[in-house]
Image (cartoon, coloured by chain):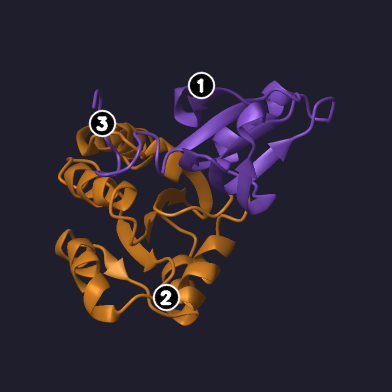
Amino acid sequence: MPYNPLLVAPMRADMTRMGARELLTAADVDAALGDARGTTLVFINSVCGCAAGNARPALAHALRHGVKPEQVVTVFAGQDLEATARARQYFADYQPSSPSIALLKDGEVVHFVHRHQIEGRPPESVAADLTKAFDRHCGAAV
Amino acid sequence: MAGRVFHPGHEELHGVTVVVTGRSGRTYVGRYHEHGDRGLVMHDVAIHEPGAAPAREAWLERQQRFGIKVDQRHLIVPTDEVGEIRRLAALAS
């Protein structure tokens, strides 16, 4: 059952403040991910105060890096159920967890951060892993 | 309490995805909730049976790479069964 919208509003605001676009419906997800060209980061948001509490600042930190995905979108697990389920269909080889982060390039998952790779780690450490992935997959082709 | 406490007010491993080596030979991977009189309470648990294919190490590698394929949403592992407990993220991938 979704949490009170008032409770999760600050967690949504964290995402939009850093430039992520919220996807609230399956149609939103298809519109964002259906066109497979380019690089897209999908952040599965979560109410978990610890893992997500590290993951959101980690992503904010990583997005200040010079190289980053062309598109950054987010769905909220446990809140926007339809959108989250549809987003997970785009990386169906990966088991659901939240928070988690998928980096897609031309429709293929090129990097995935599971919840267990976020737990207990400082945001800067998670961000460092993300920026390495950005450098590897989001830079201009040579 | 030593180390970084993931959830203030709880055990250090609360909320952390761990690998529990069972004395029976089973392996459990899931989120640690608490370890009390009832045993070790875990959530979203994948279980590897001894002798099952793929072998334990390959199975663990798959859990790390693709995430936890949940067999049991909630599980209490009896204390007698609980052997070594390690963070999944700490295993070499």
Mark nearest the camera among 3 and 1 is: 1
- Apparent colour of chain A: orange
Same chain? Circles 2 and 3? yes
Task: Give the amino acid at mark 3.
Answer: Ser
- Residue at image coords 14%, 64%: A17
Task: Give the amino acid at mark 2.
Answer: Asp
Does dot 3 land on a helix, a strand or a loop? helix
Measure the alpha-carbon separation of dots 2 and 3. 28 Å
Does dot 2 land on a helix, a strand or a loop? loop
Measure the alpha-carbon separation of dots 3 and 1. 17 Å
Q: Left or right: B31 with respect to A11?
A: right
Q: Is residue B80 visible?
A: yes
Q: Which mark is residue A125?
A: 3
Does dot 1 land on a helix, a strand or a loop? loop
Q: Which mark is residue B25?
A: none
Say which of B16 and B63 sits in front.
Answer: B16
- The quarter of the rendered structure image containing the N terminus of chain B is top left
Q: Chain of mark 3?
A: A
Same chain? Circles 3 and 1? no
- The residue pinned by badge 1 equals B91
- Residue at image coords 25%, 63%: A20
- Residue at image coords 32%, 32%: A129
- Apparent colour of chain B: purple
- Residue at image coords 17%, 44%: A61
Measure the alpha-carbon separation of dots 2 and 1. 33 Å
Mark nearest the camera among 2 and 1 is: 1
Q: Which mark is residue A80?
A: 2
Task: Give the amino acid at mark 1.
Answer: Leu
Pinpoint residue A63: horizontal percent, then vertical percent: 20, 47
Compared to residue B18, the image places residue A21 above or below, namely: below
